[in-house]
Amino acid sequence: MMPVIGLVVNPYAGIGGPLARKGSDERHLIAQALHTGAILSSAQRARRAVDAIRTATATHILTGPGAFGADMAPGADIVTLTEITHTARDTATLVSSFQGRVDLILFCGGDGTARDVAAANCCDVPILGIPAGVKMHSAVFARSPERAGQAAAAFLDSAVRPVERVEILDLDEAARRNGRLSAELFAVARSPVARGVRQKPKAGGGDLLAETDAALGDYVRRMETGQNYVLGPGTTMSALKDRLGGGTLLGVDLARDRRIIARDLTEDQLLTHLATPASARIVLTVVGGQGFLLGRGNQQISARVIERVGPDRIDVICAADKLAALSPQELTVDTGDVALDARLSGYRQVTTGPGRRQVVRVVF
Amino acid sequence: MTASIAHRSKAQFAGVHAARWAEPVVMEMTYPGRRGVVFDDAPAPALPEGAMRKAAPVLPEMTEHDALRHYLHLSQMTLGMMGVSLFGTCTMKYNPRLGERAALQHLSHIHPLQHPDTLQGILELYANFNDFLCEVSGMDQFVFQAGGGADAAYTHACVTRAYHAARGELAQRDQIITTIQTHPCSPATANAAGFEVITLSLEEGGYPSLEQLKSVIGPRTAALMVNNPDDMGIYNPDIKEWVRLVHEAGGLCFYDHANFNGVMTRLRARELGFDACMYMLHKTFGAPKGGGGPAVGAYGCAEHLVPFLPSPLVVRDGERFTLDDDRPQSIGKVREFWGNAPQVLKAYVWARAMGAEGLREAADISVLANNYMDLRLGQVRGVSRSNPDVTAPRMEMTRHSVDQVTQDTGCTVVDISNRMTDFGIDALWLSHEPWLVAEPFTPEAGELWSREDIDYWIDVLEHVVTEAYETPELVKSAPHNAPIHQLKGADMADPDTWATTWRAYRRKHADRLAAE
Amino acid sequence: MTRAHPWMATSAPSAKQEMLSALGLSTVDSLFSQIPDDHLYGKPFDLPPQLASEVVLSRHLDDLMRRNVTCRDSLCFLGAGAWPHYVPAICDEVANRYEWQTSVFGSPTSDHGRNQAWFEFCSQIGALVEMDFVGLPVYSWGCAAGHAVRMASRMTGRRRVLIPAVMDPERLSVLRNYCEPREMARHIEIVEVAVGPDGCIDRADLAAKLDHTVAALYFETPGYHGVIEGDPGALCAMARKVGAEAITGVDPLSLGLLEAPGAYGATIAVGPTQPLGVHMNAGGGVGGFIASPDTVRYATEYNTLNISIGETVQAGEYGFGLTLFHQSSYGSREEGKDWTGNSVYLWALANAAYMSAMGPEGFAEIGRLIMARCRHAAEAIDGIKGCSVDLSRPVFKEFVVHFETARVAEVNAGLRAKGIFGGKDVSKEPGTDGQAALFCVTEAHTEGDIATLVTALKEVLA
C-alpha cells in the first residue's frame, strides 16, 4: 500500500516576522499583516517540501483545501473544512481528521503551529515540521523545506520507520510582547529520525545518540542509594526516568534508590519531599534550542528548591550536538533570584557521554 | 578575479566524466572450476573431525585475468587525487613515487623479527628520521609503532597512564582535558584508555579562555590533549600559559600536530612546553593515505616520558643500530612490531627531498594559499567564514559555510559536494561532529596544488552555487557524471536490510533476489 | 628558495608573487600574525641537506638499504605474527594503483570503486569465517583481539577474559593495553587458562575458570605454536553456556582446510590479514579483521568503519556506503565505543584481490600444501641429533623445535652466517621447556629450502 502523508499548512505562519513581531499567534496581528500586505511565505515553503517528496518517492497526500495545502500539492486528496475560522482551530480540525488515515503528518508553520498540531494529534502519529514560522525552537522542524521533504520520503520508504521523541516548545506570547522571555515545554511528539546518507566522519566517537544513551546508563549506575534525585523535564530526562521505572515527560519527578517515587511535582511538593534530612541532587538537561538550564519549562525547580538542595549539587546531562547548536556557546539560568543566578553562573561541566563532560559557560 | 577561469579550467568544465564500468560484486563473478592461482598439490592431512572444514568457503571462482581486470575497473571508478582534492585536515600532498618504488624494492621482504644485524639499513633510516623529527619538534625520542594518528593519541593516553602509575598517582589522576575543536581521536582514545574526558567549549576569539581551563584543572588532571591551530585555522595564543597551568597541576601536555603544515619550522612543540607531540606521516610528511592507512602516527616525547614509550626503541650505538626491548617501564605495545616501516621510509623520502628550506617554503605556501582561497571564497555568493569576528589571517585552513545557500535554495553542503564531484573535485571535508558551524566545509590547499588547481576548485564551487540558485534540482540530484548515483541510504541503516557481506545480503534480500 | 621544488607548484617564484599580489602583500610574514612572537622558534634548524634531486635521493636510499639482509637474500623461517607467504603479482599491481593510494575519505559516488572493493574484502572474509557481519580491518590481529574483548565486555557487562597460557607475547602485550591497568575503572582482568601437553586448551582448567563473571573466552586455532585445536566447537559451547562470548583467533589461510568459526559456534572471529596477499614489510604489512553474527547486539558494538551495500536513486543500481549504524537501538549501554581512525584499508584491497584469485580450491590447496611442507620440515628437523619436535600435534604453518643443549641464539647466529633466518627464540616462554625456537614453513618454502635448512642445522649443531 502506498504510504499517505497528511499535509497541513498554516497560511499565516511567518507573517509576524516582517512586522517585527515575535510571532503571529493572535488574530489582530494576522489582520494587521494582511492589511499591510505581508508576504505569505508558508505557501512557497510548503511547495518546496512537496516537490522534494515527490522527487524522492511516490506517496499519497491528504490535505486541507486551498491555502491549507491543496494549492501546494496538486493531485492530493482533500479534506473538506465545513468552517474556516482563520485560527488554530483549522489546524486542529485537519490534524484530527488525519488520525488513523496517514503515516506521517507534515505541517508547515512555526512553534505555535507545532503546538496546535501536537495537541490535536491524539493517536501520536509521527509529525515533522516544514520551517515557516518566526519562532522555531522546537526540535520537530527540519532545517529547510527540502530537508523536510527528503526526511519525510526517507521515513516512509524505510521498513522500520524509526522515530525519536522531540520537544515542542513555545514562548508565552503575551509575556514576550511585554519584553519577558518565557518558554514552556508543551508536549513531546514522535518525529522521524533524520538519517544522513553522506559518509560519516573519519574518526572519533561520532555516535552522539549512543553517547547520550550511554551517559544516562552510566549516570544511573553511579546514583547513590538513600539520596533524593530531583529530575527535570525533557526528552533526555524522560529517557533517564525510563531507566528508573518511568516518569513524566513534561514534569519534575523525584527518584530515590534508582526508582521514581513521586511524579509531576509542584514547587511546594518538592520542598515537602526535600524536607527530610537525606541529601539530594538536581538533574537537568538543556530544554529546547535556546540553551535554558533553569527557568524555562522547569520553573518548579525554583530558587527555594535549589537553595534547599544546594546550588553546587546540580548535574546536567545533554547531547553534544545540542550544545554545539547553541550560539553563543553558553547556557542561561533565570530562577527569579538574581543572587542565586549569579552563584549558578560561571563554568559548568555538562555530561555528554559516559565519562565525557563538556564545559559550558552559564550566564544569567 | 572571479572572472579568471583559465583555459584549463574551461576545458575541465566541459570534459570531466568518471569511468563507469558495470561491475558486479566479485562474489557474482564465479564460474565453477575456474582458477586464479594454483599451488603444488599435497595430500589431505589427517585432522580431528571437529577441526575439519565441512563446506568449502563460498568464494568466487575466476581466472587471474578476471580478478585483475575487476579490481582495475574498481580502481578506475575511484577519484582519489586524480582530480583536485583539497580535503581539509588531511593535508593532501604529493605521494612521491620514489618512496613507493623504494619501499617495495627494499622493505617488502623483511621480517620484523630478523636479527638487528640484518636490519642495519632500515634501523639507520629510523634513527635518522627520529633525529629529523626531534630537531623539528624539540622532543627527545620518537616511536613509529602507532598505526595512525588516533593510535598515536592512544599511545599518549597509555603513556599518561604509565607515567602517573609510576608516581603512584594514576588512581587519583583520572581526567584528560581537551577542547571541542581538538580532533575527536583525542577524547575517544583517552576514553578508551579509561580516562574521563573534559571538553572545553569555544569562546570569544574562537578558542576557550584561560578561565575556562582553570575551572577544570586540579589534582585529578592527568593530561591535556590539544591541537593548535585548530581546523578553523585559529591559533590559540594562550597555549604556553595553558601548558604552564596544566604542568603546575601535575598533568602532562600532548600536542596533536594534525595541523602542522602551516607552522612547520616556525614553532617547536617542546619550546611551547609540551611533553609530547604527534605527527601524521601520511598527512604532513607525504606518505600516501591509501583510503585510510596503512598510516603512521609518529609519537615523540621529552626525556621524562621516554622510559614509558612502547617497545622496541631503535638505539644508535656509534655506527651500529639495535632494537631495545628491555625497558621495564614501557607500556609494552599498542600494535605488533615496530611500525609501518614502508610509510616511515616514504616520509623520510619526503623530508629529505624537502630539507629545512623546503619545510619552511611548504608552510609559507600552505598559509599563503589558504588566505588566497579565503579571499576568493569571500566573494562567492552565500559562502561565509566561521568566526567572522576573527579578522587576523587564518593559518593553513579555514572553516567556511554555505548555510545561506542552503537557506535560499535548499541545496545542502553535501549536495554541493556531490555536484562538485561531477567536475572532478573530490568530496569536501565538512567538519567533525557535532557541527559548530552550519553546512560547513573546510578546504586545505597545502603546498602541492597550483594556483590553477585552486582557482579551478573555487570556479567549480562558484558554478555549483550558481546552479543551486538557478536549477537546484540539478544540484540536489547530483552527481550525474560519477560512477554511480546517490545512495538512498535508508536501507543501509536498517538492521533488516543493511549488509556488510554478500552472505548477509543474500540472506536478507532472498525474496527479491529470487524474484529477479 | 631560488629554484622551484618538483612537489610545490607555487614555489615557482612568480607563482608565489602572483598570490601575494592578489592579497596585496609583499611577503608572507604578516599572514602568521596570530602566532605571538614569543612562540616562534627563531633558531636555524640542524637538519641534513635537502636532496631535491630524485637521482641523488634514490641513490642515497639504495646505499642505506643495501645494509639490510632481506628474505630474498636469506631463507626465512620466522613467523610469529608476520609470515613469509607468497604474494601474487596482481596483489602488488592492485595495491599500487595511484587512485587508491591517494584516495582519502571521498564519498560513495566519487570513490565508488574503492568502496565496492572494501565490501568485497568484508564479503570474502565473511565467506571464510562463515559469519554475516565483518567490519573494515583494524591495525593488527592483536588490535582486533583487543577490540573484540572490549566488545564482549561491553555486551556482557563483565570484566574478565580468559586466554590461553600459550599466546604470542607480542599480541598479548597489545591486548594488555586494551584491557587497561588495574587502576582504571574499566580494567578487564586477563586470566590465563592452562595449555595441556598436547598444545590445546586444558578443558578441566577452562571449566574451573569459566563462570558468570567471564566476558569472553579468547583462544586461537592454530595457536601461537601452530597447534590445531581438535574440537574448537566444544570450547565455544563451554563459553556460551556461561553467557560469555566465544572469540576465536584464526589464520584465514587455514580456512580452506580448517572448520570456519561461524560453523562451530564462535560468536566473534578475529585474525590477521597479512597472509592474504600483503608483504611482511618489516612488520608494516600487518592488519586484523573482526567478524561476528549480523545482529544489532553485535553490529552496534563495532568500533570499525562498516560498509554496507545499498540501493542508489537509480533503479537497479547499487552502491556501497559507510555507516556506523548509529540510529539503532542501544539497549542499556553504559559505555562509549572504542575509537575509529586510519587503519590498513589499502591492504584490504590487496586482500580482496588475493581472496578472489584464490577461490575455494585455492584456499584448500594452499592449506594442504602448508601442512604438508610443515610436517615434512618438522619430521626432518626432529630427525636431527640435538633437535626435537613434538610430531603428535597437528600443526599449521608453525611448530616448536626444542634444542637439547644448544642455545637458540647461537644456533640462529650459525644459521644466519649460512644465509638462513632461523625460528623465533621462544626459550623461557610458556609452553616450552628449555631452549626452543618457533619455526615457520609456508607455501613459499620449497622442499629444497627445507633440505638446506636441515643441512645447515646439522652443521651448526655438530
Image (tube, coloured by chain):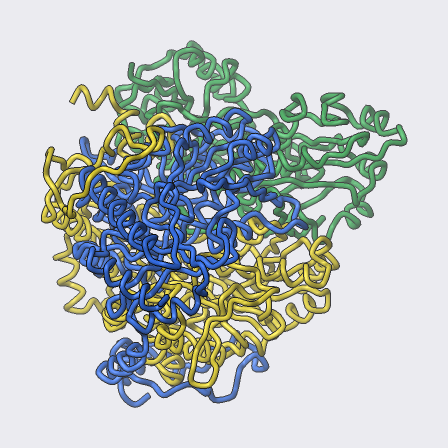
Chain colours: A green, B yellow, C blue
Decide which of C26, C352 is in the foreground and name it.
C352
Q: Compared with residue C340, is residue C213 higher up or lower down, i.e. above or below?
A: above
Q: Position of residue C155 (x, y in %)?
A: 53, 33
Q: Position of residue A102 (x, y in %)?
A: 39, 16
Q: Compared with residue B372, is residue C196 higher up or lower down, i.e. above or below?
A: above
Decide which of B474, C135 is in the foreground and name it.
C135
Which of the 4 quarters of the picture holds residue B342?
bottom left
Decide which of C126, B215 is in the foreground and name it.
C126
Which of the 4 quarters of the picture holds residue B364?
bottom left
Q: Position of residue B71 (x, y in %)?
A: 17, 49
Q: Position of residue C133 (x, y in %)?
A: 36, 34
Which of the 4 quarters of the picture holds residue B297?
bottom left
The residue under the point 55% across, 31% down is: C204
Please give left or right for residue A164 compared with residue C51 in the image. right
Q: Where, quadrant-wise, is the N terminus of chain A in this rendering?
A: top left
Question: Can residue B334 be seen at all in this image of the molecule?
Answer: yes
Count of residue discs:
0
Q: Compared with residue B214, is residue B505 higher up or lower down, i.e. above or below?
A: above
Please give left or right for residue C412 compared with residue A267 in the image. left
Decide which of B4, B515 is in the foreground and name it.
B515
The residue under the point 52% across, 24% down is: C241
Question: Can residue A31 be seen at all in this image of the molecule?
Answer: no
Please give left or right for residue B54 compared with residue A210 in the image. left
Please give left or right for residue C350 compared with residue B119 in the image. left
The residue under the point 23% across, 56% down is: C445
